[in-house]
Amino acid sequence: MEIRYGKNLLNKFRDLIKSEKEEGIRPKTPKHIAITTDGIIKWAKKNDKPLEEAYSQSNLLVKSTIKTQIINNIPIITIYLLPSELVRNDSFPAAVDAIVNLFNELKNLEEIKKNMVKISVLGKWYDLPGRAVDAIKEAIDTTKDYDAFFLNFCINYDGQEEIVDACKLIARQIKSEKLDIDAISKDQIKENIYSSYFLPPDIIIKNGKEVLSGILLWDSPNTRIFFTKKLWPDFSKSDFSDALKEY
């Protein structure tokens, strides 16, 4: 699903970066960090733990990441919470339960309210079971007026599908004669992807296998990849710090 806050949001970050460059300032922290949560199922099997415990640990790490975002003054964090292929996995019911629990907690989380953290969700989350959709909607609605920090979740998300959906939107604009085919550009595609009004990530923190997971494919050609070599439930604050040092 697209995120539509208006171009002012993207321009706000672009102007900040332009100002820093003009002043010769190298930002101490990145503007946008993306994090994958790969390895939850493998962690449960490896440690002989119930899958529910693995997802519970994942939720704790998400909440810890929010605190780290605020402490380090990172404007945007994107967490790849549920790949679309997991919908067909036997673990899907447990993943849905974890999402319901997480978003029910997030809408009341003190750090969210106090620090004005806006929650957004990228992907086809609206195709999830009703209880998950309701929990996500409530969290989005509760934080809709916040604008100090931005916390994005990729849920039922596929990076290639994101680009395909952008192409469909552009095709409809051409068909309705609102866009000329020669006007298609990289900027035009950016305006039609799910994360259209967010800066590309500066760093992707990759947990699990040392392979790319398809997160924010259009936005990540120049993004640094930090491989933790850990399964997501083993991710720690020191791993986050190490990624920041890489930046």
Image: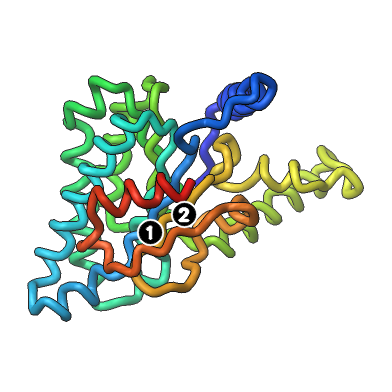
Image spot of residue 240 (x, y percent):
32, 49
Q: Amino acid at mark 1?
A: Thr
**Colour scheme shown:** rainbow
Check residue 238 in the rendering and tell me which mark sits there, or answer none.
none
The answer to whether residue 72 is above or below residue 159 is: above
* Residue at the disc numbered 1: 36
Image spot of residue 48 (x, y percent):
8, 79
Residue 106 horizontal side relative to residue 169, left or right: left
On the image, which quarter does residue 159 sit in?
bottom right
Q: Amino acid at mark 2?
A: Ile
Residue at screen point 34% across, 56% down: 81
Image spot of residue 222 (x, y percent):
63, 53
Residue 62 horizontal side relative to residue 11, left or right: left
* Residue at the disc numbered 2: 204
Residue at screen point 42% across, 22% down: 147
Secondary structure under badge 2?
Answer: strand
Secondary structure under badge 1?
Answer: strand
Residue at screen point 29% across, 67% down: 230
On the image, which quarter does residue 19 sit in?
top right
Disc 2/disc 1 C-alpha distance (Å): 8 Å
In front of the other: label 2 or label 1? 2
Discs 2, 1 touching: Cβ within 8 Å: yes
Image spot of residue 199 (x, y percent):
57, 38
**Toward the viewer: 2 or 230?**
230
Question: Mark 1 or mark 2, which is nearer the start of the sequence?
Answer: 1
**Toward the viewer: 246 or 158?**
246
Residue at screen point 24% across, 77% down: 42
Few, some or many C-alpha atoms within 10 Å of disc 1 (few <14, some 14-19, many ≥20)? many
**Toward the viewer: 156 or 201?**
201
